[in-house]
Amino acid sequence: MNHAKKAAIFNKNEAKVNWHDKALWYVREKRDNAAHDVRGWEYLREVASGIKANVLSDLDTYLIEFESNATKNGIKVHWASDAEEHNKIVHKVLETHNAKKVVKSKSMLTEECHLNPYLESKGIEVVDTDLGEYIVQIAKETPSHIVLPAIHKTKEEVDALFQEHLGTTPSNGNPEYLTNEARKHLRNKFLEADVAITGVNFAVAETGGIVVCTNEGNADMGAHLAPVHIACMGIEKIIPKEEHLGVFLRLLARSATGQPITTYSSHFNKPSEGSELHIIIVDNGRTEQLSREDFRSSLHCIRCGACMNTCPIYRRSGGHSYDATIPGPIGSILSPGKDLTKHSSLPFASTLCGSCSNVCPVKINIHEQLYKWRQLIVKDVKQPVVKKTVLKIVGKVLRNRTLYNLAGKSARFMLKYAPRFMVYSKLNAWGKARELPEIKNENFDTWYKINRKNNG
Amino acid sequence: MRVGLFIPCYINQLYPQVAIATLELLEKLNVDVYYPNEQTCCGQPLGNSGYEDDSKGACEVFVENFKEYDYIVGPSGSCIYHVKKHFDILEQTSEVIKVRNNAYELCEFIVKVLGKTDLGAKFPHKVGLHKSCHGLRGLHLGSCSERMDPHFSTEEDLLNNVNGLELMSLNRKDECCGFGGTFSVFEEAISVKMGKDRIQDHLDNGVEVITGADHSCLMHLEGMINRNNQPIKVMHIAEILNSSI
Amino acid sequence: MGRDAILKSIKNNKPTLIPSAEINLESFEEEIDVLTAFKEKVALVGGTIIELDSVKNIDTKIKSLYPNISKIISCVDESQLGTILISEKTDPHKLESIELAIVKGELGVAENGAVWISENDFPIRVLPFITNDLILILNKKNICSNLHEAYKLIGKRKRTFGLFISGPSKTADIEQCLVIGAQGAMSLTILLIDN
């Protein structure tokens, strides 16, 4: 089902749409306030974009530098070409340590690789420890937002889930109570875990270290209790120098939630005595995106989610309408690169308003890339016959003044004289919720001829 | 200075009053304005739908019609944005470059090129300004709420000088109306919901007349207002400015 | 597959080198009173900040804040309230029921109320997270304006593990309602001293 159909279903419940829209608009406003607080914000974005552009243009050098420095510090570095290889590497590390219980903090990369079902099929328990991820895990859903995974769930829905899975008493969705109950449950999981898996927010080439940012402290609770920590990263998470963290950490949380910084920004450079730290560097379509000149800068993405919060379509259709690991505007320029046919409706799920490009902390020109994907999709993906035929005809009409005049006259005639049931039939999608204008006098061409015929 | 008047196809056919207002306004400002009568369309509906290649013919007709003029002025931010941005698909002859560089949306032409903000107009009503996206973020007609730039707005500069006009403040200053060209048809549910929310914002803030510089947005909003019999009117900014001078 | 394939693919697909530009840090400088700004931000992120007249008052203050707790780990010389001793060899799981940890903060950052702490300051990495409440002792002279400055100041350290910690653990994952106290410490108190 394409985005439009899923979005139409989502819109059947207008109250829910309003609730979802307002919740995310509120996050967007918090981001605005936080950005206002930073002197030179627009320059900071420029700097971040420049750093990422440099990284992408020398990515292999930086990755090799990173690997060398990390290895010197006792970190084990692995490389995975695709999702399957990534999952196998994770599993191998788990097997080596006879690990049966895993705790995982937020990692969109592991979502992309479908790691959880893979490990579960091997008899390994994986618990997502970010509260939002935990909620969608027990609901057996996918996250609908990359930073706020359970934004689509009401507190009453969460209450029902916790009653079922944690045995909580009904609380009308009391957030403090539910969070505290989750804390107790997850604490046991941290204490029992054999291995902790985390994502990577930034990997620093010059030091071989990684940074993991959370508000809850769940990445650290996992990583510092389990004797083995596996950190999974896309190749594009590299930044050249530690000082560049100053740029990115100033941008990330402000763009994501409007906070000046996440509660914890943990810098891992060496495993602790007696522990192991593994980093898996993953391609999974990124080097291919690197080859696409028009879409390369989508790899700047630092996964803040600001584009989703500002997008009027995302707010009113919800992340699940995109049917992609990463939804929203950024998802709509990343996903077609992976599967053009499956995701062909996504670049069209936009009015190209341009707000996403303006909030992107790394200045990805998202709305321009959406436009460019559209040109590729109509060439390579089978289009609905009606749409393709009509638009090709329109092309012919618009370059021929006579045809254009004729089309204009016919349209005006139809609108003025055809009975309402014909004009507003099921074929007229515009007319489902909107009136067409009343045709009164002549069109402008005719008016001009009559009133100004000496000019032009 | 010879100005070629560009009238978007749907305004020509469906909203001629906006075209008439634009022409009269420019004439009243002593602009030597011509209407090339072989013009068709800028090609935007095709480009936005992914059929950029099929729009080349229309773009070439546009250049052919307007290459003689010092400025090309049209009452549509999105069409002018399309000319400036997406005519890069044509071979960049000196004519194409001239047309791209000298295409102006109406308000921008009045304020930047003519240097006028007070036109002596009068419109004693509560007005809500819809800041159309392509004009705002594409042509930089004003600052936008998500960027940390000093505030400015070409349309506000004009409207604030209209006698008796009260410019009302909205809850969301520059959220998209949901038209988006073929989006309005292919993602109809969201398009309508976005339009509905925009209209409600204006109603909630006491607006009597919604205005803007892009009639595609206004057409979408007016279509919904009329279907739902809502007590609010829609007028293109050219009509407001022209109506009393 | 793997390393060689990835590096080869990058080499083939990467664009012409785009050089990195110098960052003009002056663009971010502001005339602010770092101490006032720091105190405001700590409160904003849900932390508590208390200025002490003297280092000698640390224990008195802590006892008044936490009169009834017994399981305390002190990693600072300035506090004698520790009841449990730990070393690098302690099994981190044993810290499960620690009620209060007192740790030295190395550097405060005014723009976000964060404090840099590192493995130099506490022997077991999980301590600042697993403890129920956390107190940081910070010298008020060690507060810088923003993260660019902070990274300059911590740039010469021996790198093992460290973090910027800003306020207590928190989440807004249930209908955007902010809840203080998620998986990490339930509270964060900064005692500002002057020596």
Image (cartoon, rainbow, N blue to C red):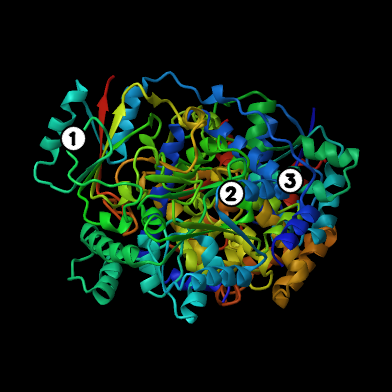
Which residue has dot 3 on it? A57
Asked if residue A138 can be seen in this view, the reply is yes
Q: In the image, what residue type sits under mark 1? A: Gln
Which quadrant does the C terminus of chain B fall into? top right
Q: For this view, does A121 lie left or right of residue A177? A: right
Residue A381's mark? none
Callout 1: chain: C
Observer-nearest of A355 and A425: A355
Where in the figure is residue A168, as x and y percent of width and height? 20, 70
Where in the figure is residue C181, as x and y percent of width and height? 26, 51
**Mark 3 and mark 2 on one chain:** yes
Q: How much space separates mark 2 and mark 1, taking CA atoms?
A: 38 Å
Which residue has dot 2 on it? A70
Density class for disc 1 (Cα within 10 Å; few <14, some 14-19, many ≥20) is few
Density class for disc 3 (Cα within 10 Å; few <14, some 14-19, many ≥20) is many
Select label 3 or label 1 by which is in front.
1
- Mark sitting earlier along the chain (3/2): 3
User: Dots 3 and 1: beta carbons under 8 Å?
Assistant: no
Callout 2: chain: A
Where in the figure is residue A455, as x and y percent of width and height? 81, 39
Which residue has dot 1 on it? C80
Which quadrant does the N terminus of chain B fall into? top right
Q: Is residue C193 above or below residue A339?
A: above
Q: In the image, what residue type sits under mark 3? A: Ser
